[in-house]
Image (cartoon, grey):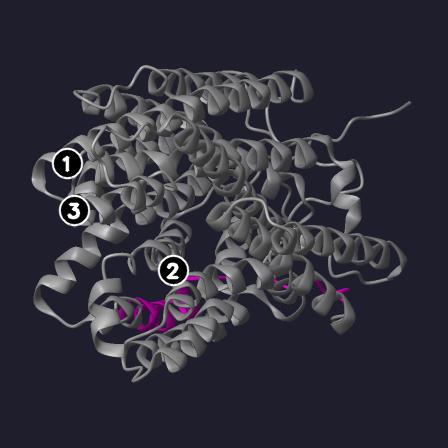
Amino acid sequence: MSTNTPVPPAPKAGPREWLGLAVLALPTLLISLDQSVLYLALPHLAEALHPTGTQTLWIMDIYGFLIAGFLITMGTLGDRIGRRKLLMTGAVAVGLTSVAAAYSTSAEALIITRALLGIAAATLMPSTLALIGTLFQDPYQRGRAIAVWAGCFMGGTALGPVIGGVLLEFFWWGSVFLIGVPVMVLLLVVAPSVLPEYKDPKAGRVDLTSVLLSLVSVLTVIYGLKELARHGFGPAAVAAVLAGLAVGTVFVKRQGRLVHPLLDLKLFRVTAFTAALLILLVSMLGTGGGYLFITGFLQMVEGMSPMEAGLWMVPAAVASVVAAQVAPVLAKRFRLGTVIGVSLLIGMAGYAMLVFVDPVGGLPLLLAGFVIIFIGVGTFGALGTYMVVGSAPPERGGSAAALSSISGDLGNALGVASLGSLGAAVYRDTFAPPPGTPAGASRTASASMENAVNTAAGLPAETAEALMTAARAAYTGGLNTIGIACACITTLSAAVSLTLLRGRHGATPSDDVPPPQREDTSEEAAGDSLPAA
């Protein structure tokens, strides 16, 4: 005779847990702000520090490079030494390096401090996301919490230029780095009382060779992709990507041999985990490329300032935040794969609208498409992240969170590189300089829209306007082509979701995954599926 012991329901989060989520939202918002707030400060920074063109690129890129490069290491380190401990250590480092960056006296010093700031910030993202999994045992509440996390990240990216513009109206360029200091101080004061500690009790030592391999692989691939986006296909950029992939292969093989790997390859045996990573990667590919040309259209075709363009992006950011909050409600009512697939098809409709944008009078259609795209982005971003974190065992939460972030970063970089190159190629092929344009000006303007804007500034008014009309038409043609490509990409992502996640109500862990436990609880059981209605 056999009896079935009912599984007790997962404990519900109370006020302390939701206050903990508010604390975790602060560094999440800060990381996304820091990645976009510097754009408006560049002219002021250039006037004060006189960086070379190469130094300017490193000032912009080094922060994101090192965040991506250290995510796997920091995610696993949090699982080993304690996620709250790593979060608070990172908060101290972010505060100190932010002050150092704000008061840099040379371009070289700013590059170094931005690099250190990126390493410090890499501790925050996987720690915040993994701690959400510790705080919220109930799957529906966890989904809502991750939706808040995703909304903060997406909203911060859009608000960065706006906040940067306001600061630069009243303060010097370094003020954009000081935003994080009070945020980190507040985190350090409140975190010990509202955030639980969690670490893997069976964790071994960190394998330094794996750390080096993962760092070289991720940095080299992203560097190569950015170079492809910036300069087109060239032997050095392609070699960097191939070298990064080769090192990544060595890294993966090493993880399979280690008793305590930096990255547990068993995670990829969970269908929901692998599918969610794939969807995030492919979907962010379209988002990265589309975002690049949409913002370029606002500034170079519509002639907006960076701050004006940032303000026009706010409606899309709000749409993504709202969609992220609605996503768990929909996933509770309908199958998860269906909700993600439909959200991707909504994004596809937005990209399809870009195909019909014209250089004259195309702003309303562009903005409408932008908002629809980000409704889809907000939905699948929140649910995809939930699936990745929910599919992993609790002792691998930091690693899972890091992989989620890296998947998005790689997809974004790949989208900027591939779709940016596609749009640039369409621009070069379709640009037709008007009669009477000097040969040198025509040659320069045909290389890129940025060159056309700079070239037109030195021409007589009538010639400049004719040149810009041709450039706007060619650039819009590139945007239209990217709209087609992104619509195809999101349709592919939707097919993956509807196929691989068919029948799933949530992120179902593998059979050998134990229920999550917190250090201060004796016995807690938790499901990893969003309950059906």
Q: Quadrant of residue 439?
A: top left
Task: Kindly identify which residue carries mark 2.
Answer: 27
Q: CA distance from mark 2 to mark 1?
A: 49 Å
Q: Secondary structure at mark 1?
A: helix
Left or right, 425 with respect to 174, comes to right
User: Mark 2 belongs to which amino acid?
Assistant: Pro
Q: Secondary structure at mark 2?
A: helix
Q: CA distance from mark 3 to mark 1?
A: 23 Å
Task: Kindly identify which residue carries mark 1.
Answer: 463
User: Mark 1 belongs to which amino acid?
Assistant: Thr
Q: CA distance from mark 2 to mark 3?
A: 28 Å
Q: Secondary structure at mark 3?
A: loop
Q: Nearer the viewer, residue 323 or 408?
A: 408
Q: Quadrant of residue 206?
A: bottom right
Q: Which residues are magenta?
A: 182-204
Left or right, 160 with respect to 35, comes to left
Q: Measured from the top left, where is residue 30 in percent x and y?
A: 34, 59
